[in-house]
């Protein structure tokens, strides 16, 4: 089975992080569970590196949501994120779901995945994981979670 870092992260997120916060803190138990689930040690290691980098960028205090600078995408970002993904990030920022710092964190974590391209569903999962890790972003996380699991999500204009 060809798995990616995102596959490991989604498995972790769906099976551990949202259900049992104490278990999520026990890295050895999580690694064992992932290996038993069939993920390769290399991908498990990369996924934990990805999560460590996300935790290292966690702000001490929630950021003030304000109109930030306009983001210009270039190079590898344009290669990996199609127009739909970039438009979705702009939508989230314009509607106060993400601030400019969180947008940059989402971009950093999206670019850190071992994937040539990310589709909109992959990007939504990255956004959800970033918001889950951000203090003070509970309302944004709840809104994003609703959008992901609703039968008819709010349209993006």
Image: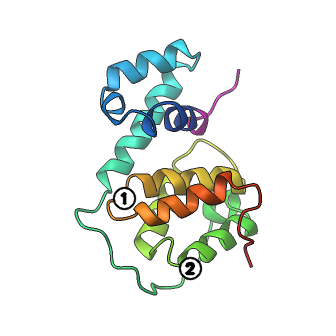
Magenta span of residues: 1-7
Q: CA distance from mark 1 to mark 2?
A: 17 Å
Q: Is residue 12 left or right of residue 49?
A: right
Q: Quadrant of residue 131?
A: bottom left
Residue located at (38% from left, 52% from top)? 133
Number of residues whose C-alpha sits closer than 10 Å to that of mark 1, classed few (under 14), some (14–19) or many (20 or more): many
Spot occupied by residue 23 in the image (x, y as percentages of width and height): 35, 28
Left or right relative to 28: residue 98: right
Report helix, strand or loop for mark 1. loop
Q: Front-most of 143 and 7? A: 143
> Residue 20's spot in the image, x, y percent?
39, 33
Which residue is depicted at the point 50% across and 38% down? Answer: 13
Residue displayed at 74% across by 69% down: 83
The residue carrying pointer 2 sits among few (fewer than 14), some (14 to 19) or many (20 or more) residues within 10 Å by Cα, namely few
SS type, badge 2: loop
- Residue lying at the far top in this picture: please name it: 36
Q: Earlier in the sequence, mark 1 or mark 2?
A: 2
- As for residue 97 lying within the magenta part, the answer is no
Q: Position of residue 157 (x, y in %)?
A: 74, 79
**Height in image: 119 above or below 82?**
above
With 41 as the anchor, is 149 left or right in this view?
A: right
Residue 73 seen by the camera: no
Residue 134, disc: 1
* Relative image position of residue 80 (x, y in whole percent): 67, 57
Looking at the figure, which quarter contains the N terminus? top right
Residue picked out by circle 2: 95
Residue 47 visible in the snapshot: yes
Judging depth in this view, the residue of 95 and 4 nearest the camera is 95
> Which residue is at the front of the view, 86 or 138?
138
In magenta segment, residue 3: yes
């Amino acid at each position: 089975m060809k798995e990616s870092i995102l596959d490991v992260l989604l498995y972790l997120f769906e099976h551990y992080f949202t259900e049992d916060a104490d278990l999520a803190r026990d890295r050895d138990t999580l690694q064992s569970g992932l290996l038993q689930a069939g993920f390769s040690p290399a991908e498990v290691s990369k996924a934990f590196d990805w999560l460590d980098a996300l935790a290292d960028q966690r702000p001490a205090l929630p950021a003030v949501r304000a109109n930030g600078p306009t983001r210009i995408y270039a190079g590898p970002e344009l290669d990996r994120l199609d127009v739909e993904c970039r438009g979705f990030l702009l939508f989230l920022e314009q509607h106060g779901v993400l601030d400019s710092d969180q947008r940059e964190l989402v971009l950093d974590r999206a670019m850190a995945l071992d994937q040539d391209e990310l589709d909109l569903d992959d990007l939504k999962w990255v956004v959800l994981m970033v918001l889950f890790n951000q203090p003070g972003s509970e309302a944004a996380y709840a809104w994003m979670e609703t959008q992901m699991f609703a039968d008819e999500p709010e349209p993006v204009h």
